[in-house]
Amino acid sequence: MRSLSIAKPKSWLRWRPLHGAMIALALGLPLLLTAWIGGSDAWQRVRQFPLGVLMLMLALAFVCWNLNAARLRLMLGGRAGTLGQRGALGIELASKFALCATPGGSGGPATLLLLLAQRGFPPSKGSAVFLIDQGCDMLFFLSMLGGLVLFSLINEVNWPHQALVQSALAGLALIALLVCLLVYHLPRLLRVRRFRLNWLSRNRRRRLARGFLGFRQALKVTLSLPRTTLLAMLMLTTLHWLMRYSLLYLAVLGVGGDVDWVWTFLTQMLAMAASQLSFLPGGAGAAEVGVGSLLLPLMAAEQAAAAVLIWRLVSYHLYLAAGAPFFLRYGVRLFKRNS
């Protein structure tokens, strides 16, 4: 994993026109898609969106930020100095801003490592904390994915594109199973000559192997934590994602739609997986089109377009707006310290 050099803060703060254009496109694309799919009726739905539902969505987003901040404090366990909830929340929002503002979220881990290093927590240990965080998320989604597959097979569900969705779920579950097997047998596979990826340079193979082994070790560390700590981390992870993935359901209700919560959860899971293919920050374009296409069979076009716009405003644009001041404050402080 790449980490940012503390000795070169200017490279961390450097503004690049292409990157700025990509962020601008990511911010404006939901508006264009709303106008294209729903037309003027979609804007009418947005203007009539209930204020109470919107305030509930904003409150859920705020709770999600604090849940992640509490999980960060729990993972650090006092090893990064005295870190209160406010300080952890600042690190969380600054990291999430970098995550949402860079293609593929590449800036998020680097920002987290840098901010932890400023508190005397070395990047090597910071990488382990980040991987533990990812391991908790992976355990949650594996559990939810398995539950959704069983739910679709046991119950008589009436989902749009049912065969396609069930195939996608089964495919994701199979991929997850293969990844688990690869992680479990990784040390043995790295010693097998046919799996050495000889078309890559030796240094790249070593970095790749170290990254995979580090991820495996982080999962082992996660699973070997005290049961109370592990349970608390998993509970915070579960609460965060259940609330975060309820935002679309509330947006659908606010525009007058009638869709099951399970379908909105599944819609976001599939769409956010597809958004990894987008070159724009935050998976812009792919996320909106993916969610909208899965909602259209159950809602009018203007309802689906308005729901997707409100959902993205709260789940993506709000993260940028809330995290930008913290990101800039930490950046300016780092710049002054090293100038």
Image (tube, helix red, strand yellow):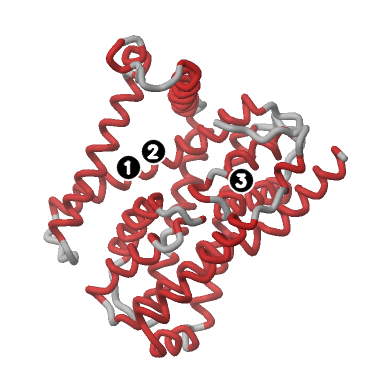
Q: Does label 2 or label 3 sit earlier along the sequence?
A: 3
Q: Quadrant of the image for the N terminus?
A: top right
**What residue sits 47% from the left and 88% below the top?**
48
Q: Are marks 1 and 2 in contact (CB under 8 Å)?
A: yes
Q: CA distance from mark 3 to mark 1?
A: 22 Å
Q: Which mark is residue 24?
A: none
In this orientation, which residue lies closer to the viewer: 57 or 13? 13
Q: Quadrant of residue 2?
A: top right
Other residues around mark 3 within 10 Å, as few (<14) / some (14–19) / many (≥20): many
Q: Is residue 273 above or below residue 47?
A: above
Say which residue label 1 marks: 143
Other residues around mark 2 within 10 Å, as few (<14) / some (14–19) / many (≥20): some
**What residue sits 58% from the left and 40% below the top?**
109
Q: Is residue 240 left or right of residue 78?
A: left
Amino acid marked by disc 3: Ala
Q: CA distance from mark 1 to mark 2?
A: 6 Å
In this orientation, which residue lies closer to the viewer: 117 or 29? 29
Other residues around mark 1 within 10 Å, as few (<14) / some (14–19) / many (≥20): few
Q: Is residue 197 left or right of residue 110?
A: left
Q: CA distance from mark 2 to mark 3?
A: 18 Å
Say which residue label 2 marks: 139
| Closer mark to the observer between disc 2 and disc 3 | 2
x and y, in percent, of residue 217 in the image = 47, 22
Say which residue label 3 marks: 70
Q: Is residue 268 left or right of residue 104?
A: left
Q: Quadrant of residue 33?
A: bottom left
Q: Are marks 2 and 3 in contact (CB under 8 Å)?
A: no
x and y, in percent, of residue 244 in the image = 46, 58
Amino acid marked by disc 2: Leu
